[in-house]
């Protein structure tokens, strides 16, 4: 189904029925509705198909593995890629930096307001912190379930304080802590805040734990 080609789906079902699997009654009891749904979705502009979940009745604690029925959840949708303009990239970097300044100073997360639909779009992010070009922390939240700006804030804090490969970042152990933490975020202070926080949007994830602890490690192998 992920091919989006109803002809191929139908041919695959027909071929599978010829495999001679004992007891196989059908590969898709809803073949007709499936093919109709694919054509209707395409006609409405869907250009992406994602299999959200597949399981069979044997996956249930009460299921019999010798006699199963399969179930699938499939999403037909139109993908609109993000538009990370230079201005939006800079805005997110400023936000990530200032969030760390505020959090490492007094443990608070600064409020942020925007009317930019791209920054309000539910997105996945990965934040990397580097110190003098070396990795200092990196954690991502890969489920697109919160506004982009909020995900950047949460993952900035997580990358700084919760990456188990590194000690938590504090004012005391940050090599750039010789400059003073400001009470407001002027541009000059942002120039002094050195970590290069990079953001990349991803699509599918699993998430667990507190709001800013769920994530994925990258930039080298986690041991």
Image (tube, rainbow, N blue to C red):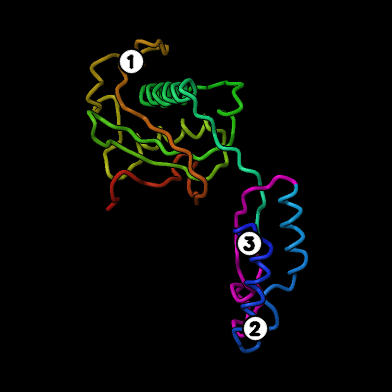
Q: Residues within 10 Å of mark 1 (few under 14, many from 20)?
A: few
Q: Which of marks 1 and 3 precedes in the sequence?
A: 3
Residue in the image at 30% along x and 50% along y: 222
| Real-space CA distance between mark 3 and mark 1, rounded to the nearest whole angstrom | 49 Å
Residue 208 in the image: above or below residue 89:
below
Q: Is residue 217 above or below residue 89?
A: below
Element type at mark 2: loop
Q: CA distance from mark 2 to mark 1?
A: 65 Å
Residue 108 at x, y = what percent?
A: 45, 25
Q: Write the residue at 32% across / 20% down.
A: 193
Query: Mark 1 sits on what residue?
Result: 191
Find numbered disc 3 in the image and state the secondary structure of the residue it sits on. loop
- Report the residue at 73% width, 63% height from top: 34
| Residue 200 % position (x, y) | 44, 37
Q: Is residue 163 left or right of residue 174?
A: right
Q: Is residue 102 above or below residue 10?
A: above
The magenta stretch is: 44-72
The residue tagged 3 is 1
Alpha carbon distance from label 3 to label 2: 24 Å
**Measuring 46% from the left and 34% from the top, which residue is drawn there?**
154
Q: Quadrant of residue 197?
A: top left
Residue 67's disc number:
2
> Which of the two discs, 2 and 1, labels the residue nearer the N terminus?
2
């Amino acid at each position: 189904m992920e091919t989006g080609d109803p002809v191929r789906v139908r041919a695959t079902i027909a071929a599978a029925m010829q495999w001679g699997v004992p007891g196989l009654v059908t590969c898709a009891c809803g073949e007709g509705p499936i093919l109709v749904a694919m054509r209707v979705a395409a006609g409405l502009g869907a250009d992406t198909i994602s299999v959200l979940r597949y399981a069979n009745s044997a996956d249930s604690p009460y299921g019999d593995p010798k006699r199963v029925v399969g179930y699938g959840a499939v999403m037909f949708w139109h993908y609109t890629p993000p538009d990370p303009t230079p201005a939006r990239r800079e805005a997110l970097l400023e936000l990530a930096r200032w969030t760390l300044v505020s959090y490492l100073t007094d443990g608070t997360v600064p409020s942020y307001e925007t009317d930019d639909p791209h920054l309000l779009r539910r997105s996945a992010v990965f934040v990397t912190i580097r110190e003098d070009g070396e990795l200092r922390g990196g954690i991502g939240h890969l489920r697109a379930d919160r506004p982009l700006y909020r995900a950047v804030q949460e993952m900035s804090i997580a990358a700084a304080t919760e990456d188990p490969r590194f000690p938590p970042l504090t004012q005391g152990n940050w090599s750039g802590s010789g400059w003073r933490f400001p009470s407001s975020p002027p541009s000059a202070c942002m120039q002094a805040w050195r970590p290069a926080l990079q953001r990349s949007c991803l699509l599918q994830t699993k998430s667990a734990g507190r709001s800013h602890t769920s994530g994925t490690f990258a930039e080298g192998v986690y041991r």
